[in-house]
Amino acid sequence: MSEVVSFTRMEDGTAEDYELLGRLEAEEMKSFPDRVLGWLRTMEDSAGYRISRLDHSLQAATRALRAGEDEETVVCVLLHDIGDHLAPANHSEVAAAVLRPYVSEKNYWIVKHHGVFQGFYYFHHVGLDPLARDRWKDHPHYQATVDFCENYDQNSFDPDYDSLPLEHFEPMVRRILDDGRRRSWA
């Protein structure tokens, strides 16, 4: 039987209980990049697009890599839609929350807001304001998010684009999501 804590209420936990949980969490964190890559692999559905969501992510990341973006940005581009299956109504916020402990404030902000910024290209077709992004016009990462959507997101649905395979990006994902990079949540 695996080790378990002694308490049924957290306030009753001992130092030994929390040491055990810390050890188990450290082991869990080692497999985190594998879980994220697994989430990407589940995105084989097209959801009505001409390519799968996985292919969209690979195409977007390939474009970012070929444009000379740094590794952290390429990984953020690759993972920007991983929230689609879990939370389609706020997928951007979910993806950003997953990435937040590992990436810069700028990349976190871009991923978190890309859904609204992407609306610039289609909101007018669904009765929403395509300029909804302009509420952040004075934000320091506004233009970077516009560029993210223009250069990597809105144009990455092309079935003829020669995207790199997921295996090409796996080492990058592992480096960026390395537990040693994790920032404090405080």
Image: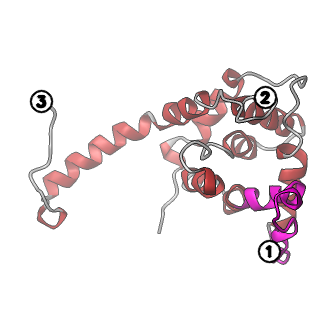
Taking the spot 52% from the left edge, 57% from the top edge, the residue there is 183
Closer to the camera in the image, 165 or 126: 126
Residue named by callout 3: 1
Residue named by callout 2: 51
The quadrant holding residue 129 is bottom right
User: In what element is the residue under mark 1?
Assistant: helix
| Number of the front mark, 1 or 2 | 2
x and y, in percent, of residue 95 in the image: 61, 50
Above or below, 68 against 146 in this view is: above
Mark 2, other Cα within 10 Å: few <14 / some 14–19 / many ≥20 = some
Closer to the camera in the image, 159 or 59: 159
How is colour applied across the structure in the image?
secondary structure
What kind of residue is marked 2?
Ile
x and y, in percent, of residue 144 in the image: 84, 60
Separation of marks 2 and 3 at Cα, in angstroms: 45 Å
Q: Are marks 3 and 1 in contact (CB under 8 Å)?
A: no
Check residue 117 for magenta coloring: yes
The mark nearer the N terminus, 3 or 1, is 3
Mark 3, other Cα within 10 Å: few <14 / some 14–19 / many ≥20 = few
Left or right: residue 179 versus residue 142 is: left
User: In what element is the residue under mark 3?
Assistant: loop
Residue named by callout 1: 136
The mark nearer the N terminus, 1 or 2, is 2
What kind of residue is marked 3?
Met
What kind of residue is marked 1?
Trp
Taking the spot 12% from the left edge, 30% from the top edge, the residue there is 1
Separation of marks 1 and 2 at Cα, in angstroms: 31 Å
User: In what element is the residue under mark 2?
Assistant: loop
User: In the rendered structure, which segment of residues is drawn in magenta?
Assistant: 113-140
Left or right: residue 38 versus residue 108 is: left
Separation of marks 3 and 1 at Cα, in angstroms: 53 Å
